[in-house]
Image: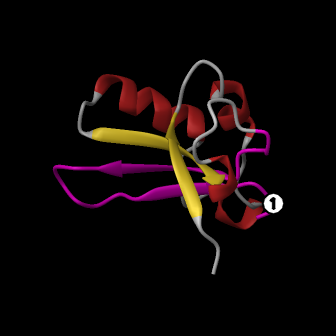
Amino acid sequence: MVKVHLRKITHDNLRECLNLEVDDSQKTLVATNAQSLSEAYVDANLFPFAVYDTSVCGYEQPQVPMLGFTMYEVVAGVGFRTAFNDRF
């Protein structure tokens, strides 16, 4: 079982998040990370996070690449979105 660590999307990890893409077979199923981050910017009920391996826990600057992106919505409780790089 893989354990992950969630971090806020910040100026430091934004570019890496925007460069993540889902597999071609899933591109019609989810929005891009840029679209999701734009929605989160204007909707306080959406919470976007970067997904990292747990080895970065406690470190200010991760020394490993971001594994993925996820976002959840508090009010509706639906609409969970994830995007993982192809190495995960």
From the image, give the main secondary structure of the stretch colored magenta.
Answer: loop
Q: In this view, does 29 lie to the left or right of 44?
A: right
Type of amino acid at the residue the image marks with label 1: Asp
Vertical placement of residue 58 versus 14, above or below: below
Q: Tell me where residue 66 appears, x and y as whole percent.
A: 71, 45
Whether residue 80 appears in magenta in the rendering, the answer is yes
The quarter of the picture where residue 13 lies is top right
Vertical placement of residue 8 versus 12, above or below: below
Q: Which residue is drawn at 40% across and 59% down?
A: 80
Tell me the SS state at disc 1: loop
Q: How many labels does the image show?
A: 1
Look at the image and tell me in which quarter the C terminus lies. bottom right
Whether residue 19 appears in magenta in the rendering, the answer is no
Q: Tell me where residue 8 appears, x and y as whole percent.
A: 48, 35
Q: How many residues crowd mark 1 within 10 Å: few (<14), some (14–19), many (20+)?
A: few
Frontmost residue, 8 versus 47: 8
Q: Tell me where residue 14 appears, x and y as whole percent.
A: 63, 26
Frontmost residue, 62 versus 23: 62
Q: Is residue 52 left or right of residue 19?
A: left
Tell me where the magenta segment starts and ends, as one range: 63-88
Vertical placement of residue 34 versus 88, above or below: above
Q: Is residue 75 left or right of residue 64?
A: left
Name the residue that disc number 1 marks: 86
